[in-house]
Amino acid sequence: MLWGVTTRSKTKARATGQAAPNGRPLGDLIALPALEGAAVVPDGAAEGVHVAALVLDDPGARPEDSALLVSPGGVPKPIPAGVVAVVTRASVSGKPPVPVIVIPDDRPWGEVLGALQGAISGETRDVETRNALRRVLIAGTGVAGIAEAAAEVLGSPVAILDEYLDVLGTSDLTDARQESLVDAIEEARTHGPASLLGPFIQAGVKGAGIMRLDGAEGTEFAGVLVTWGPLPAAGDRAVPALADALLVERVREDTRVDTEARLRGELLEELLAGEVVSRESLVRRARHLGADLSEGAVAVVGRLQDPHSDGRVITDPRLVRRFMQQTRGVLELHWPKALVDWHEGLLVILLPKRAEGDEGEGPEALAHTLARRLLAATGPTVPGLTLTLALSRQQDDPERLGSAIDEAQLALSIGEKLGRAGEVVTFEETGTYKLLFQVFADRPEELESFYEQTMAPLVRYDEQYQTELVGTVATYLDLDCNLAATAQTLYTHRHTIRYRLDRITELAGLDIGKTDDREKLSLGLKAMRLLGRKVAPPMREKPAHGTKAARGAKG
């Protein structure tokens, strides 16, 4: 053997799923322009044969695995070890033990061998791959275009995913393949936000192979390749070319997103800081970002938390990036002209005024619907985390959008104090809570004093005697002082409710039958909730139905 060319290289790629055949398919080699007119003997024998080395006939040379033997004089006997096919110009009779490529007499050996060498070593495919990827990068078709180029080069349907298993681009996927991919992604996401990629690669996708794509020397993650065909061999130069193209596209996209985010952030930060921004300047800058704030907006403020760690606010940049990608996706679909930014642990959105909804819904109702969609999308996006959203009123004056953000922030703070994490809170529904909250923020001792004068005696009594006075007064006031409705709601006899109301009057010194005293008790309940005071639930067992204790239970 005078020389040999193989497909081995130091490319960094880790693969799992279908086992990849070693080398280039023999059918690809036969299709090279330099081999035009060549025939394979026997007919159809090239199917399933892959070539990883090109060698000359030399009986004394070391064998090469998956080798294509160049033997101008015909098929040697016996076939050397490792040879899977032969290329010759001599005629072949009978049924040779391996596929034989018979080239025409007018084909120069130099041209044939050069083409075979380039194809097997990957040089020809490398040029084809880079040209295909260069075209889509110049055209600016994004990862969708890169996926199409990859499918063309690999000759099989493909999907390209990011580290969060978001599908960035696909090509030639049937409905069945799309469904199997979605099923595998959903299964992997049950493992939590920090371990998506590992479970996905380990479990695999039905009928497909998976390859992780890394940049040079494996220092930077580029993406995940899923292919419904043979995975590229370890030395296939299409792999680093594909990784490079994905990294270029990521840099391009990150630059665009970062630039837009900086411009959005500067505008929203000025509003958050209460700076005076003229109407003309605000509307003009917003239009550059694709939003029309000339008729005002509804402000939305949100916080992402871990409910299992005492409401710990999430600051992990990976999770924030993933969350913001999904948030922008929801907004692009349902409110494409919105401005959104992540500012010091807060999600801040301005929703420009829109036409009324199908049922005559105004901007605030439409914003509430969008907020519920954002909550629904958060669970699958960042499993285990909770998003709480607060909405301002519609602010028609662009110059007062800063106050709209303030309203949303106030509603968010109140909602969190009231234990409404994971819900949508509106400024309108906070009612008198917002007045008390301002007192709590400016003079917390006054709110504490008011609580002590109203609800504190009832709380202490409930805790000492395992009664339910606080729950009774809260229900009674919520039901507009309807005794029968209160008894029905609490599954308690009306005489028991009357007894408890009398005890409330004795302990708090407030007659719930008087308007002023009822207002004080109502405000006292709100103060208690804002202060985070809770009554421990009764520890006694519920009396059996029909017993004397059940019939005569008091307090």
Image: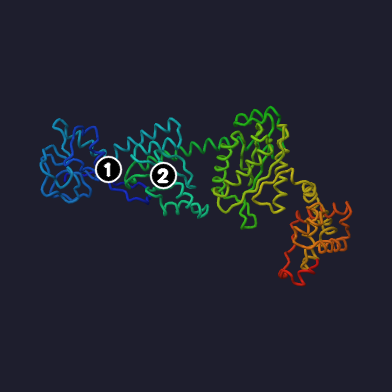
Q: Nearer the viewer, residue 9 or 40?
A: 40
Say what amino acid the circle numbered 1 marks.
Arg
Circle 1 — which element? Answer: strand
Q: Quadrant of residue 290?
A: top right
Mark with earlier residue (2, 1): 1
Report the residue at 59% width, 50% height from top. Answer: 315
Say what amino acid the circle numbered 2 marks.
Ala
- Mark whose residue sits in front, 2 or 1: 2
- Residue 27, horizontal then vertical, whole percent: 25, 40
- Within 10 angstroms of label 1, few (less than 14), some, or many (20 or more) residues? many
- Residue 168, horizontal then vertical, whole percent: 46, 41
Q: Give the quarter of the figure containing the C terminus.
A: bottom right
- Within 10 angstroms of label 2, few (less than 14), some, or many (20 or more) residues? few
Residue beneath label 2, please?
176
Q: Nearer the viewer, residue 148 or 139?
A: 148
Q: Is residue 137 above or below residue 434?
A: above
Left or right: 10, with 492 as reference point = left
Report the residue at 50% width, 37% height from top. Answer: 253
Circle 2 — which element? Answer: helix
Q: Nearer the viewer, residue 259 or 412?
A: 412
**Residue farthest along the bottom direction in this orientation:** 548
- Residue 329, horizontal then vertical, whole percent: 55, 40
Q: Are marks 2 and 1 in contact (CB under 8 Å)?
A: no
Residue beneath label 1, please?
24
